[in-house]
Image (spheres, rainbow, N blue to C red):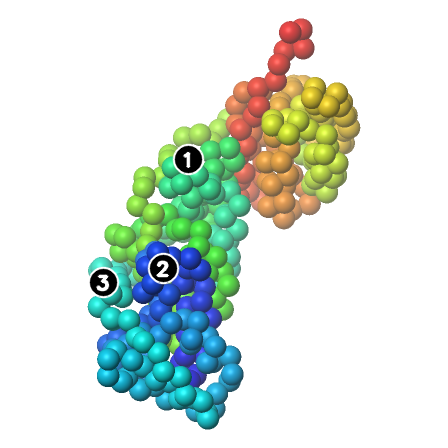
Amino acid sequence: MIQQLIRFLPIAEKVIARKTTLPILTHVCVRDGHISATDLENTVRMKIDDTRYYTIPINILKTVLKTKPKHLEIDVLEDEKVQIQYDSRKLTFKSRDVEEFPTTPASKFKSLGGWSLDMIRKLYSQLPYTSNDELKPALTGVYFEQNGTLKSCATDGHLLRVINNVNLDGKSKLKNKATGIIPKKALQILARTVKGQVKAAVSKTHLRIMLGHELEFYVRLITEKYPDFDSVIPREFQGSVSLEKAKFSELVKDGKPFVNRETKLGAFAIGESSVNVSIEDPEKDYTWDSKVPVIERQGEDIEIGLNLSLLEQILKSIDEQEVKWEYVSPISASILTGVNGQEANTLQLIMPIRLEKKDE
């Protein structure tokens, strides 16, 4: 039983909320041959060699296992008390009513097949593009759509990132169709817990991941409707420019200290041989200019205003050495992708900032 508790504790600690108004949620629950932990949105459950009913505060379990006991025995006493004997030590404490502990989601689940570690990491990589606005719950999670392949989107309303095929290497053996929005915390837990391919299943309200060693992880999906992100992605462009990512990133990084703290605006003038950026901060009477050479350009000269902090975030998420920037107009969304000789599997969209006319 010690080994079972040792396997269970690390993920239980990640699931249980540090602050909660419900004391029962600071406990793990042993019931029907399983041990469980939950924060109501995420639940981890594991089979255990114990069919009794009791709860243990997570801090007590953590403290006991930290001593690395060679022997451990749990006794359920009268008056709802539990006693843990480990090596030469004995600890007695009050157990909470098991009936207070939430039940494990019992919905009918449909198999989604095997999800690889690489696929889960790619879903996790979407988190910087999600929103923190609780008034827009759909945007606080990562959207997935499984239909032969697995497509994912994340957006905060200013930036948008789409991975057209999360299973590009084909290592995940996908089954059935499904859509859903996975909350941030669940992906944070999975990215730190999953070691290889896992079995995934979905119900109307939950995602279930089988982690191995009898561990089951349940995630309450965000049930809000996700925006129609395909409709905001431009399909035809008036021009494009290719730039060396390292030089472009350095330009943005160097210009950031001089932007206006509210708008973070940089004006990018895309020319035939270079992209010039101009920054003005009327509050501090700053002006800053620089440029980066162009690898290739199509279309006419154009000037587009962008938020440098958001642009920097996009560039950090692009792994390729070359970046392609496609645009329609100064007031339309721009698309940035990595260039690797193949059709881009991941695209990043950024909304522009309208520039004031020079003669105003």
Q: Is residue 156 left or right of residue 203?
A: right
Three-letter amino acid code of the residue under disc 1: Phe
Of 169 and 268, nearer the camera is 268
Q: Earlier in the sequence, mark 1 or mark 2?
A: 2
Identify the residue shown where x is 52% and y is 51%.
125
With 78 as the anchor, is 160 left or right in this view? right
> Which residue lies under the disc numbered 2?
39
Name the residue: 72% across, 30% down.
258
Of the residues tagged 3 and 1, which is closer to the observer?
Answer: 3
**Mark linked to residue 229:** 1
Residue 318, position as x, y percentages in the image: 61, 45
**138 versus 26 height, above or below:** above
Q: Which circle's residue, 3 or 2, is located before the other in the chain?
A: 2
Residue type (three-letter) at the residue carrying disc 3: Ala
Is 50 in front, or is 213?
50
Mark 2: give few (<14), some (14-19) or many (20+) Cα within 10 Å: many
**Which of the pair 106/87 is nearer the observer?**
87
Quadrant of res 71: bottom left
* Mark nearer the N terminus (3 vs 1): 3
Q: Residues within 10 Å of mark 1 (few under 14, many from 20)?
A: few
Distance from label 3 to label 1 (Cα)? 32 Å
Please tell me whether mark 1 sits on a helix, a strand or a loop: helix
